[in-house]
Image (cartoon, helix red, strand yellow):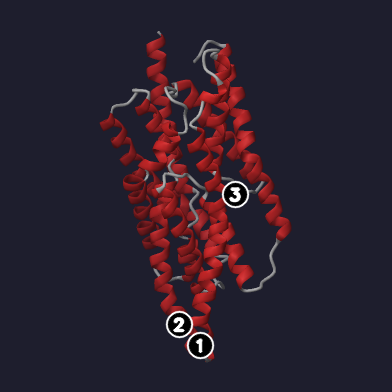
Amino acid sequence: MADQLTLILIQVLIVMGISLAFSIGANDETLAPLVGSGVIKFRTALLLGGLAAGFGMIFFSRGVGKTVGADILGPGIKYTTFMLLAVLISSILWLIIGSLSGIPLSSTHSTVGSIFGVVIVYALFYKDLRIEQAFNYTKLLNVVIGWFLSPLFGLLITFILFKIIAKLILSRLKGLTMIEKSEKRFNWLLFLAVIFAEIWVGGNSAECIGIFYGLYNNESLTWGEYQFYVVICGIFVFLGIFLVGRFVIKNLASHMTEARPSEGFIIQLSSAIILMICTFLGLPISHSHVIVFCILGMNIAQKKEVDYKGFAKMAVFWVLTFPMAALFAGVIYYMFLLNGFF
């Protein structure tokens, strides 16, 4: 009976992991500036962007997935199916709360926070496991430091890139005709930057891959099955963008028709650079946080007014994400333990 329940739970986790991949694509806004600029047709943008994100997840997500699915745990600790189930339920619950509050929260922060809460409860429940042995604290600290440094570097890179491009190109443009010609060239640079960014969004948004790596690590999946589901997740990220993400992208694009392609290019390139570096380092970060700080860096560079009140509201939710997700997940997993489900 217990083995049958475990098998059912594994199937549930597989479905939820694939659904998470679909939702990552459905909520991806990376294509919005490209669609808003009108460089290519809407369906073409969805197709190319979805393929880029799927490609990134299939070929570049292993490092981040391994970090989430195994490396942040202490030596000898592996996720049980109920631990992974608690992590997924908690992550989804906190993200729903954020959505209802109108705040773009990080699925990465929510997932890692949920893992933290579950493992702490696990360590408290098993008396032979000390809290200090529950995590690879070096790896966990690197992840948390990455959360703080990646947005700040996004701001800095955007600021520097704008100043360089403004000095070398934009400041030398005389007259409306030259400016329009220059911005048309930036349209195509924006296209390349957005597609490049989508690859690393797919590679770094690997919470779903972390679930499958956790199942592989606890021997619920073989290596071949793990790789198969990575490909399936890549396909579902593409489907999420193409089938549902179009609504988010179209809505945001309608507010970006007045944005200059040169500005969009700088913001997208900056965020892509940060995502690429963190993906190669196996550090899961928040794309939305990086983008917000890149936009902030652009506004500061252009000496535009910054909505610090709105930014402060987002920052409060960002800071709360980790502890609240940890609390939710810990309570959920504790309820499982009380009912004899490990």
Q: Where on the picture, by quarter, is residue 304? A: bottom right
Q: Residue at point 47% right, 43% down? A: 23
Residue receiving disc 2: 182
Marks 2 and 1 sit apart, C-alpha to C-alpha, by: 8 Å
In this view of the protein, which residue sits in the foreground, 299 or 283? 283
- Sequence-earlier tag: 3 or 2: 3
Q: Residue at point 61% right, 63% down? A: 296
Crowding around mark 1 (Cα neighbors within 10 Å: few <14, some 14 to 19, many 20+) is some
Q: Position of residue 95 (x, y in %)?
A: 58, 40
Crowding around mark 2 (Cα neighbors within 10 Å: few <14, some 14 to 19, many 20+) is some
Marks 3 and 1 sit apart, C-alpha to C-alpha, by: 37 Å
Q: Nearer the viewer, mark 2 or mark 1?
A: 1
- Sequence-earlier tag: 3 or 1: 3
Residue receiving disc 3: 104
**Relative to 109, residue 275 above or below:** below
Marks 3 and 2 sit apart, C-alpha to C-alpha, by: 33 Å
**Relative to 223, residue 338 above or below:** above
Q: Are marks 2 and 1 in contact (CB under 8 Å)?
A: yes
- Under circle 3, the secondary element is loop
**Relative to 94, residue 297 above or below:** below
**Relative to 43, residue 20 above or below:** above
Q: Is residue 125 visible?
A: yes
Crowding around mark 3 (Cα neighbors within 10 Å: few <14, some 14 to 19, many 20+) is some
